[in-house]
Each structure stands twice: as structure tokens, then as C-alpha cells.
Amino acid sequence: MRSLRTGLSLAALVTGAALLFAAPAAHAADTPLRDLAAAKGKVVGTAVTGSKLTGSYGDIAGAQFGSLTPGNAMKWGTVEPTQGSFNWTEADQIVAFAQAHNQQVRGHTLVWHSQNPSWLTNGTWTSAQLSSLLQNHISTEVGRYKGEIAAWDVVNEPFNEDGTYRPTLWYNGLGANYIAQALTWAHAADPAAKLYINDYNVEGVNAKSTALYDLVKSLKTAGVPIDGVGLQAHLILGQVPAGLQQNIQRFADLGVDVAITELDVRMALPADSAELAQQKADFKSVVAACAAVTRCVNITVWGFTDSDSWVPGTFPGYGAATPYDENYVPKPAYYGIAEALGGTQSTAGCAATYSVTSQWNTGFTGQVTIACTGTALSSWNASWTYGAGQQITQAWNAVCTQSGAAVTCTNASYNGTVPDGGSVTFGFNASWSGSNPVPVVTLG
Ligand code: XIL
């Protein structure tokens, strides 16, 4: 009896906790992005920060995505800050989380000009030393995770905008052949991992993407192990390159896979609802372009929440670049991804409903309910025009002003927030005579 009671109260506690954490998962009834993607033969992923993989962040990362990319945890500067002393803590944590959630891991990244340890960048090396440092780094890291990484961004950002090679530590010391060597060493360390070259501003057809295309073509011809091309897709609002699908297709036609590896769409802050709607269209068109090409296998967002995005720190004044807001509420962009993957979620939006709740010979009581699905508001105003001389006399749960026939009601100090899946109602008394037609309410 005692143990039964203990069991019952534990169950009640667990239920309570589950309810608390259900708030960001108000879309539990919607099909997760990873399942929508799987039904199309695609994988949808996100970059993550290992230390954040608990609570709501962990719940969403695990439930919605089929692939994780460590945002920083596998970079050289993170894993070997001091020569010969390794720190795999965060990388291991992300790999373990992914395995527990039946997710792929995209390894990122082995050869790059950025985020290298200072002992490496400040050192003076002969090309033989540089070559052996790079080989050791690749063998050690790829070997450590052998069999656990679906794909490696082996080489990151090798090109300048004009399609010439970027003059990096690697290019300057080893020549362009560092790319073929890195791929060959990675393949030796984990023959099952898909090996990618990854870059930005290569989403459309341009000088840089054509240089990448020519490189991949020559690597294939030379028999170098190259399996895929990563298009980072750090995009600006309203600027999805027109040739994106065509560009994906031309790489696929070379016989390599393509992945959208770091998708985000930044905008000048603060974001308004028109910009968030444009962002939805942008995410949707990128995902649709990938979905349309069989060999485009993975779409990864560079952080799934605005609270874990590199954009505000890197592009001052810009942000709101990811599919979830800072409070883990899915933004219209989330629904853009879902729709491009064949999801039938209700379109994100907020709507106002006006109704007359009681009416007498000279007056009436009305109310307006503002409800949101798939998005949320932090402040609102509702406006309408009375067509038959109605006049507001009193309002509650909003501040209403009327000028002629035009009425505008703004939120009170305490009810500006309309959560995703929630609603706010305000009421008013008004006078009427003759007729009392229902107006159309506009939300602002
Ligand atoms: C970014 C990370 O998101 C930031 O946290 C870090 O401070 C800088 O690097 N292209 C890449 C990624 O390939 O590794 C970069 O990630 C973003 C640009």
C-alpha cells in the first residue's frame, strides 16, 4: 500500500513536470521535422552547443532533428587548445546525445583557416611539419569517432569570392594539394564516413561555386575520396539565390551528394511580422530546392533557436535568423521548413475575432479575441471601422480610442503577450442605433 502510494505521487509529479515542459512543444501533435524529412528521404539537422542539450533546448533538438552538427565542439581550437593535450568533452557529449536520440552526426570541421589553436597559427613550420600536423590531426579526430560520424566537413571555406584559393596556413604552406591529402587521410581513418568540402556564398551559380564545382570534378577524376559538397547558406532576408536548385543539381550530376549545412536567414533587428513572413518564404524555398534534388541529402540549420545563433555576435544589428525564437516558440520559418517537407501544419499566424456578447436598446457589449498558432505576439493592437455610428464608451483588458468611426485598441500593460497556441480577449461597451453590423478587425 505504501509503495503504491509512493508510486502514485511519483507519477503525479512526473506528469506535472511533463506538462511544464510541454509549453515549447505545443506542437507535439504536429509531425516533427525529422519525420517529415525522413518521409522524403532527407535528413533535417541543426548545429548545437553541447552544454545546452538539456531542458527545452535538448527536448527540441532531440525531437525535431535527425542530425546534429557540433557548432564549435569539433574544431581544432576546441579539441587541441594546447599541442598534444586534447579536450573531447563537448564533442563526446554531442555524439552521445545523438546516439541516444537516433540521430546522425555531421563532423565539423577538420581543415579550416579559422578557429585554430594559437600554438598552430603562431608556429613556424616547414611544409613537411605542416603536412604531418594536419595528417595527425585528421587521423586522431576522425579515428576517435570512427563509425560514429555520418559525414565530415573535411575542408571548410577553401575559396575566395572570385574563385581563387583562399591564402590560408594550409594553402600557403602546402599548395592546393592539401585538399586532396586531407580527404585521403580522412578516408583512411574512417572509410564509411561521407567526406565533404563546405563553403559559403556557393549557393547560387557564381565564380566561387564554379571554382568549387571544377575542384570536385577534378578530385573525382583523380580518384580522390570526395562524397559531397556543403552549401552553408548563411543567407540574408529576401536573398535566396535564384539558381539554388540548378546549382545543387549540377553538383549532384557530378556524382556527389549535396547538403545545406549551415542554413540561417538574418535580418535587421527588430524583426517585424512582414520580415518573419519573408523569412518563412526563404526557408521554404531553400528546403524545397534541396527536396527537389534526389542527391541533396541533408538540410541543417545553424542553430535552431535565436537564443543560440552566431548571427547577432557576428553581424551587429542583425539576428532573428533561426526557426525558433529565443523562447523556443516556433517562428513562421519553422512552418516554412515543415511545408517544404510536405507538412500540413496550420500556417502560423494570429487572428482577431470580434463578437457582440449582449445587446440592448441603446447599447451593447462586445469582445475581441486574438489567437495565435505557430507564432506568438509580445504586443498587439486591433483596429476596425464602425459602419453604423457605433461609439465605444468603455473598454477593459485593452486601451481603446475612437476617432470618428475608427477604433484602435492596444494591449494593456499585462496582456501584450499572446503565446503560440494561446489567446487574449478584451471587452468593451458601446452605443448603437439603427443597426449594429460586425466590423472586420485588423491586427497590427
Ligand atoms: C561559427 C559558430 O557558430 C560561432 O559560435 C563561432 O564563434 C564562429 O563560428 N561558417 C562555419 C561555422 O563553417 O563553423 C561558423 O560557426 C559559421 C560560419
Image: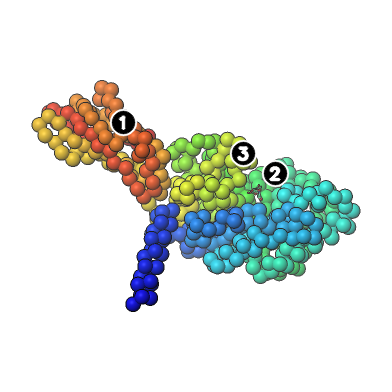
Q: Which residue is mark 2?
A: 207
* Disc 1 versus disc 3: nearer the observer: 1
Residue 347 drawn at (x, y percent) = 39, 49
Query: Where 48 falls versus 393 (above or below)?
Result: below
Residue 188 drawn at (x, y percent) = 76, 68
Mark 3 residue CB less than 8 A from any atom of ligand 1:
no
Query: Where 437 falls versus 419 (above or below)?
Result: above
The local secondary structure at tag 2 comes to helix
User: Between marks 3 and 2, how big is the CA–CA gap?
Assistant: 24 Å
Residue at point 77%, 60% (across, down) = 85
The residue positioned farthest toward the left in the image shown: 361
Q: How is the image coloured?
A: rainbow
Q: Is residue 326 visible?
A: yes
Classify 10 Å Cα crowding around label 2: few (below 14), some (14-19), many (20 and above): some
Residue at point 50%, 46% (across, down) = 326
Q: Which residue is mark 3?
A: 315
User: Between marks 2 and 1, how big is the CA–CA gap?
Assistant: 56 Å
Q: Is residue 292 visible?
A: no
Give the total of numbered labels: 3
Left or right of 198: which side holds 272? left
In which quadrant will I find the C terminus? Answer: top left
Q: Which residue is mark 1?
A: 399
The local secondary structure at tag 3 comes to loop
Question: Disc 1 marks which amino acid?
Answer: Val
Locate residue 218: give its quadrant.
bottom right
The local secondary structure at tag 1 comes to strand
Residue at point 39%, 37% (across, down) = 379
Q: Earlier in the sequence, mark 1 or mark 3?
A: 3
Residue 422 drawn at (x, y percent) = 35, 48
Query: Where 167 falls versus 443 (above or below)?
Result: below
Along the line of sight, the residue nearer the viewer: 134 or 394: 394
Question: Disc 2 marks which amino acid?
Answer: Ala
